[in-house]
Amino acid sequence: MFVVYMILFLAGFYLFGLAFTVTSMQGLVFVLGLLLVSAALALCLHLPAAKERHHG
């Protein structure tokens, strides 16, 4: 699962940089990058804790 988190995280940073080079919809591209980074961090922190709760 770490690979999935890392791909989401790096794709979000790629979109941050891409937002400064596209000619239209810069805000949308930046917000999508922000959402990808946020999702990667949220999943990385939440899913291991949820997995531990179900062992029992």
Image: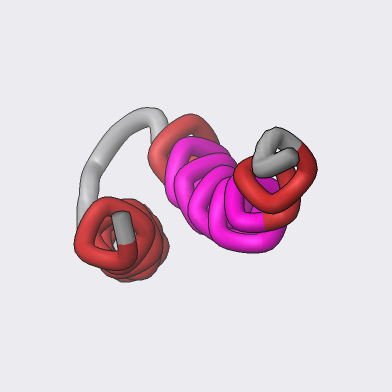
Quarter of the view holding residue 13: bottom left
Q: Nearer the viewer, residue 2 or 25?
A: 2
Q: Say if the magenta span includes residue 8.
A: no
Q: Residue sitting at 26 percent across and 52 percent down?
A: 4
Does 2 sit left or right of 7 as displayed? right
Residue at 39% of width from left, 30% of height from top?
Answer: 25
Q: Is residue 38 above or below residue 3?
A: above
Give the vertical position of 51 relative to 5 (above or below).
above
Q: If the image is split into quadrants, where does the C terminus sit?
A: top right
Q: In the image shown, does 26 or 54 lie closer to the viewer?
A: 54
Q: Is residue 38 magenta?
A: yes
Q: Residue at x 47, y 45 (%)?
A: 36
Q: Quadrant of the N terminus?
A: bottom left
Residue 55 versus residue 27: which sits nearer the camera? Answer: 55
- Please state the horizontal and vertical placement of residue 6, each as a whole percent of the image: 30, 67
Q: Residue furthest front?
A: 56
- Position of residue 47 measured from the top left corner of the image (x, y, whole percent): 61, 46
Horizontally, residue 25 falls left or right of residue 47, namely left
Q: Position of residue 15 (x, y in %)?
A: 31, 55
Decide if residue 35 is on the left or right side of residue 53. Answer: left
Residue sitting at x 66%, y 42% = 55
Secondary structure predominantly adopted by residues drawn in magenta: helix
Q: With 54 as the anchor, is 21 left or right in this view?
A: left
Q: How is the image coloured?
A: secondary structure
On the image, the x and y values in percent for residue 18 come to: 25, 59
Magenta residues? 30-48
